[in-house]
Image (tube, rainbow, N blue to C red):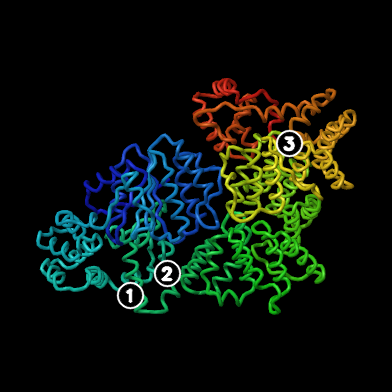
Amino acid sequence: MTVLPTVPSHAVDRPQLRDLLDVGAEGPLILVVAPAGSGKTVLLAQWAGSLRDVHVRWLELSAADNDAVRLARRLVEELASIDSSFSALDAPLGNAAGGLGDPLIEALAAAFADLTDDLVVVFDDLHRVTNADVIGDLWRLVDMLPPRIHFVFSSRVDLGLGWSRHRLHHGLVEIRGAQLAFSGESATGVLERVSRRRVDEVTAAAVVRRTEGWAAGVQLAGLRLRIHADDSELVEALEESDRLAIDYLSEEVLDALPADRRQALLDLSVLDELSAGLVETVTGLEDGAGFLGDLERESLFVVPVPGGEGRYRFHHLFRDLLRLRLRASDPGAEARLLRIASDWHHARGAVGDAIECLLAARAWIDALELILSRGRGVYEHGETATVARWLATVPQEVIESRPDAVVLRGMVEGMSGRAAIGESLLRSVIGRPDVPLGTQLIARAYAASGVQFHPPAERYLEDGLQMLAAADEAGDPHTVDLLEITSLPHLRTIALISMGRAQLFLGDLDEAARNLHSALVSQGASYAPYRIHGLGSLAIADALAGRLTAAAGSADEALDLARELALLSHPSTADAYLGRALVAIQRGRPESGALALHEGHVRASSNNRTQLLWIAHAASRLIDPQGTDVAAIPPVGGPPPVVSDLLRGIEHRRRRTAGHPRAPEPPSTWSFSAFEDVAGLLAGGDVDAARIALDSTGLPDAPSPARIAEAGALRAWLADLEGRHSQARALLEDALDAVATEQLVHPFVRAGAAVIALIQRLPDDSDGFRGDVVSRFYALHEPTSRLPDPLTARELELLAYLPSRLTNADLARRCFVSVNTVKTHMAHIYRKLDVVGRDAAIARARELGLLKDVDPARAGVT
């Protein structure tokens, strides 16, 4: 829970400015922009402390918050202390490739909408975040805030955003330096509290005149008065000085301190944060806690870090002054002291802090060694963007002298969603004669994984083949250990998974499945995230091929493993979620795949896996035709061939069912769109062309269930049109019987009313599959009741479970989402149906025709 910044004992109340902030809180955003030392933080802390019945959450920002994942995690942790639903948002915490990301913004906006209490979130020192994507995403989130939620942006500089729109639409309140400047009366109060003596009007007026009411200057003047009691000396110095007051007053304050204390302050200025143990190590003082406590009490420009017990930092302005003096007096001191601090952090297991100190000290080689020593947690805990930032800080010539560092940077850039940068780095070492073969194999394997991000898939398929061939030829080459995931067995697994994905994107589903099976039985598949990746991709390939039992099993195994290891939010689960969504489509129950579709999309988007996002987009056209999910938005770039084929088929079917079938050239090979081409010929009565097309594309030796169902449905339709009615029935019965165990409904539903009519004339079947096909066809074509605020596809999926009496925890387990996600959707359902409670929701949904009595066990993919 937030600990508000401590208000200094010398601070004076400023009721007029607090009133202005109260007015600003009637809109979504308050903007406070003023130079360093103007009193922004003190004013906001005073105001926050005066609020009643309002939650306040405070984020003091630093350069480290340019890491969107870090900032997102901090923000969510603060919000979760108000409402636990924030701890389980159905979106990745930030987009490692840049900003917070659309999924998180939307999830935050939805969670804010459900809060019943007023909330103020203060983003202090926002100027320290220079990541334009993060700032832009916060700005977009402001536009989505409900009336009870208010943001405060506090910054030294304007952030370059479109404030005019907020001034017009939201009555934006802005507080700037001129309003924060102290007047004579308020300055007198500060001077007296800091100096601990009475100050006359002449002295106060002189201070205001020379400092222009600048809070830091007034405070420094008070400290000078504490040291030198003669008011006339201060007035004379201020009146005669042509320099900024801060220069004169800071020197006066520092020079008046005992030498050992002054040196300690100079030494400590190299640190972002101060703690007792670190103070003692860097300065040699015996009582670090007492030293920090004295500085705070004496207003010597240290402030407690909010939420960090026993941790302090310098006022930014004072720290700048101290560092300038330290560099002037001892040019080598800063690097030396930062190394001492790095060793202290490293000894306590804070490797990240140790690396930050070494980078600040420009100790590039030592920093690289620590960075290269990082383990699997970097990948598993979403820290790849941080490592990429560290490596980008190291001069290019230093990185290039270490091929293993080049490869590591390529790996983490790719994992973070900056695939073009990562791939360029990886390919830069392939073929270099001075780079060991093992290091080149790592580069080649991870270059192959670029198939998730960019076309053409053929290039990455070749990368995988070349990596495996080179490894086989070399026998057992040594590979450097990067992130503990670059042993030769790991690289073989990566190559096989990447090859399987390439074949999946190219539409060769059987070959994709073979390579993915090989990957899953390889030694490297013992690493859980790789196994989750492989199982998920296999689930997609099998689902598209109609092997639904296997697909559902692979997807569930992947997600069970992810849940066991607390990796459900990891990007590696995206494939498995999308596999579940595709199984739901193929079983004729697309509405039961909406949650999985959304979960898969947000995880793929967290690191910009555009080729997988295209699969999510194609699935959304079938699951969510109203476009209520973010997956309805097409990704950037072109789709892979398998998705191009799916989208063509979907469009052709739309035209056919609207009574406008296209007249294509007969297809030469079978595909999703080829099915629709033949169906279009049959719907248009061109039986000769349809027969030629079906004969020319014939069944392979081992057809997939989807191919069997598609060919059987179309051949039965053709036979019926040609008057071969008994043969039509036999063809249809064979096709239905062949895929009944898979519950593969979608090909028959896609074929349309003519094939459904043929199925209805068949004898009843013992397992009810034929009846299920017919009922699913009509269910998918029934109009739904219109609500003023329609239920989303995800809400409709959960609505179908209400009669089952499964608990929220049961639903969360079944759908592989958090309980809080289920609760959030349930709250939306009740609100949109204008009911209270499950029973009322069931009754209202049935009244509106939104709910049918179904077997809950068959409502999903399990």
Q: 123 above or below 773?
A: below
Q: 748 above or below 445?
A: above
The percent coordinates of residue 406 (x first, y second) are 62, 71
Res 738 quadrant in image: top right
Total numbered labels: 3
The percent coordinates of residue 777 (x first, y second) are 71, 30
Task: Decide which of tag 2 and tag 3 comes sooner along the chain.
Answer: 2
Task: Say which residue appears at 74% left-offset and 42% top-offset.
Answer: 676
Q: Nearer the viewer, mark 2 or mark 3?
A: 3
Per the image, label 3 sits on a secondary structure element best described as helix
- What number is the disc on residue 282? 2
Q: Residues within 10 Å of mark 2 (few under 14, many from 20)?
A: many
Task: Say which residue appears at 49% left-offset and 66% top-offset.
Answer: 356
Q: Nearer the viewer, residue 835 or 273?
A: 835
The percent coordinates of residue 801 (x first, y second) are 63, 28
Position of the C terminus, as image quadrant, is: top right
Q: Nearer the viewer, residue 727 or 513?
A: 727
Q: Residues within 10 Å of mark 3 (few under 14, many from 20)?
A: many
Q: Residues within 10 Å of mark 1 (few under 14, many from 20)?
A: some
> Is 406 left, or right, of 125 in this rendering?
right
Res 61 quadrant in image: bottom left
Q: Nearer the viewer, residue 11 or 530?
A: 530
Q: Nearer the viewer, mark 1 or mark 3?
A: 3
Task: Decide which of tag 1 and tag 3 comes sooner along the chain.
Answer: 1
Look at the image and tell me whether residue 26 can be seen: yes
Per the image, label 1 sits on a secondary structure element best described as helix
> Pointer 1: what residue?
325
Kind of residue sitting beneath label 1: Arg
Kind of residue sitting beneath label 3: Arg
> Pointer 3: what residue?
750
Per the image, label 2 sits on a secondary structure element best described as helix
Query: Could you tell me how far apart the alpha carbons at marks 1 and 3 are, in whole angstroms?
Result: 76 Å
